[in-house]
Image (spheres, rainbow, N blue to C red):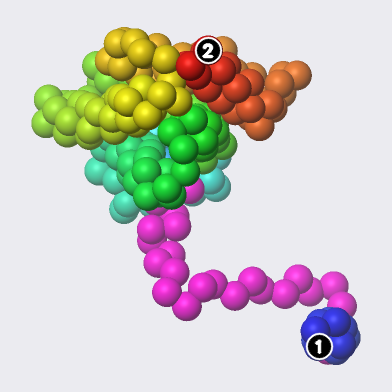
Amino acid sequence: MSESITSTAARAKPGRPRRRKRPRNADPQASTRVEILKSAAAAFRRLGYHGATVEEIAAALHMKKGNLYYYFKNKEEILFACHQYSLDRLMQILHEVRQSGLPADEQLRRLVHAFVHTILDELHGTALFLDLEALSPPHLKAVIVRRDEFDRGVRTLLEEGMARGVFARGDQKLLAFALLGAVNWIPRWFNPSGAATSQEIADLFADFFVAGLRRA
């Protein structure tokens, strides 16, 4: 393996960066859409939905405003896509955790970890309640339906843990609200340049909730 890498590097022309091969099935439009969402989510977090402009979102990606409109019709559609992207990831994570066969406390730990990383690292602070009032009624309804689906999945996990004696008995609805509310509030105070990293926050929140729910 090392000989192959060395010989390939030797043939490369000095001073010219080699192009990274795109995965065979990669969709360049889908990749660009995700980059736009990341830029938009960062702008929404810093300036708020109404304070962030489409020009700023495009400029952060070295794009022209007109090019951005090729992917999204308007700013509200970008906000909706941010929510959809986050919810897609969270539902995927929830499904993987539930299919893992691990004990309920380990499932919850992995879920909280992934939840924190999704909202802090993947879309730079897109909370599930971020600027909901800016969404059109059809988009708002779609987000709430899927958010409630995730909420029910968390409640089911807690209920299963209680039934198996892993977690202490309690109101799983209120406990799910406490967990989701705490994690969703992180983008309101998180500072990427601050002392705590997203990994440290994920560890602390996972430890806190798992320990608090465990049967004494």
Going by the numbered disc 2, the residue's amino acid type is Ala
Residue at image location 54% in from the left, 72% down from the top: 22
Tell me which corner region of the image, top left, top right, bottom left or bottom right, holds residue 90: top left
Residue 212 position, x and y percent, is: 52, 13
- In the image, residue 79 sits, relative to residue 170, either above or below, namely below
Kindly identify the residue that appears in the image at 37 percent across and 50 percent down.
99
Quadrant for residue 202, please give it.
top right
Task: Give how far across and how far down residue 129 sits, in percent.
Answer: 33, 20
Q: Which residue is mark 2?
A: 216
CB-based contact (under 8 Å), mark 1 and mark 2? no
Q: Is residue 115 left or right of residue 18?
A: left
Q: Nearer the viewer, mark 1 or mark 2?
A: 2
Residue range in magenta is 11-36
Label 1, label 2: how far apart the Cα atoms are: 57 Å
**Any magenta on residue 30?**
yes
Type of amino acid at the residue the image marks with label 1:
Ser
From the top left corner, tell me how far across and down residue 35 is, in percent. Answer: 48, 48
Front residue of 63/121: it is 121
Name the residue located 23 percent from the left edge and 33 percent from the top edge. Answer: 149
Characterize the magenta stretch by its predominant secondary structure: loop
> For the residue carrying disc 2, how many other residues have a C-alpha within 10 Å: few (<14), some (14-19), or many (20+)?
few
Whole-percent x, y for residue 147 in the image: 26, 29
Local secondary structure at mark 1: helix
170 shown above or below 41: above
Badge 2 element: loop
Query: Quarter holding the N terminus?
Result: bottom right
Location of mark 1 (residue): 4
Let me know if residue 214 appears in the view: yes
